[in-house]
Amino acid sequence: MWQPQWPPRELIDFIRSGAKFIIAGHKEPDADCIGSQLALASLLHRLGKESVLCSAGPFNRTEIQQYQSLIKSQISEADRKGAFVLIVDCSMEERTGDIAPSLRGLPTALIDHHASGAPFGDALYLDAESPSTTALVFMLFKALGETPTPEEASLLFFGLAADTGFFRHVDAGGGAVYATASELIQHGANPKSAFAQMHGGKTLNSRLLLASVLSHAVPYFDGRLIVSTEELEETRRFGMESRDSDTLYQLIQSIEGVEAIVIIRQESEGRCSVGLRSRDAVDVASIAAHLGGGGHKNAAGFAKDGIIKEIYPLILEEFAKVFR
């Protein structure tokens, strides 16, 4: 049950003492990451501070592609000069991807809501119970005595809605999540527009890719686990921008008896990414951690060298410990 926590004094002091900030997110950014970065940059601008937004990308998700032009993929020496670093939505250096070396050696603070990671830096605002990183950034607005503009509220709501599956994942006792959403709506966020941004504008190829991946679904452990795959040929045929993971997980999770879902994607000839989702009982973050990744109890992932047929049995072995 999430109870909003004020940002630590170290973070407030960190922000007040800096004049220029590099605001970085994790590679393969999502709505919560981008919403946090953009809202934070706007807040810093209002405080009279300079900011540089950066991300290793890629911007494959259709709902965030409109923001790509605002965010640098590389950090120059001029960007680094005199800069403090704010990393949002991750607490592992390697999760920032190719930009990680450019962030080293600078004063650094983290704002994140993931349970797993290897936190580092000079100031940490970590809350694994928080529904999104944008919810923490909203608390930072309050702590600094600032009220979000409609544009900022929309960015914060966008991340909150995305990371809660548009509030599908909010449990009993989650009133604080809805209270936060209500505040952001009062400040100008538009739920209807956010939903359209998250779920509209999909291509025919995205629906065909969904059908193709669903056709590979296989049940295990009496249907409690379903594993599906996306072959490299499918990715090349339909395009990475056609992926609609949220809808895919929704469709599989609606199957009776399903407690956990795994999607294995062949990202290149020698490397796979793996997404894991679960209902309440199964902790997929611990499974992902055993295989080199991390995340939340009910949403996690990892990447691993190899091909699908090599990684598949490793996943079944881990889930066998849970279901047997």
Image (tube, rainbow, N blue to C red):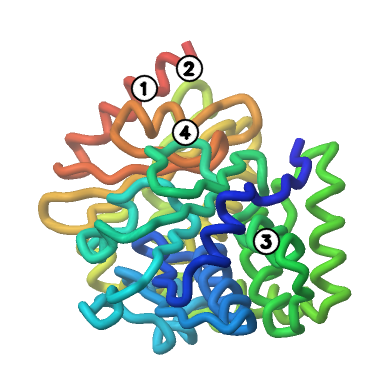
| Identity of the residue drawn at 11% across and 55% down | 269
State the separation of the CA atoms marked 2 and 3: 38 Å
Q: In the rendered view, does 2 fall on the left or right side of 125?
A: right
Which mark lies nearer to you, 2 or 4?
4
Question: Which residue has dot 3 on it?
Answer: 140
State the separation of the CA atoms marked 2 and 4: 13 Å
The x and y percentages for residue 36 are 56, 67
Q: In the rendered view, does 65 fall on the left or right side of 155?
A: left
Q: In the rendered view, does 218 fall on the left or right side of 132?
A: left
The x and y percentages for residue 313 are 26, 27
Disc number placed over residue 322 in the picture, else none: 2
| Sequence-wise first label, 2 or 3 | 3
Marks 1 and 2: CB-CB under 8 Å?
A: yes
State the separation of the CA atoms marked 1 and 3: 39 Å
Q: Residues within 10 Å of mark 4 (few under 14, many from 20)?
A: many
Q: Residues within 10 Å of mark 2 (few under 14, many from 20)?
A: some
Q: The disc labelled 4 sits on which kind of residue?
A: Ala
The x and y percentages for residue 270 are 11, 50
Marks 4 and 3: CB-CB under 8 Å?
A: no
State the separation of the CA atoms marked 1 and 4: 12 Å
Q: The disc labelled 2 sits on which kind of residue?
A: Val
Disc number placed over residue 318 in the picture, else none: 1
Marks 2 and 3: CB-CB under 8 Å?
A: no
Which mark lies nearer to you, 1 or 4?
4
Q: Is residue 22 above or below residue 163?
A: below
Which mark lies nearer to you, 2 or 3?
3
Which mark lies nearer to you, 1 or 3?
3
Q: Is residue 69 above or below residue 190?
A: below
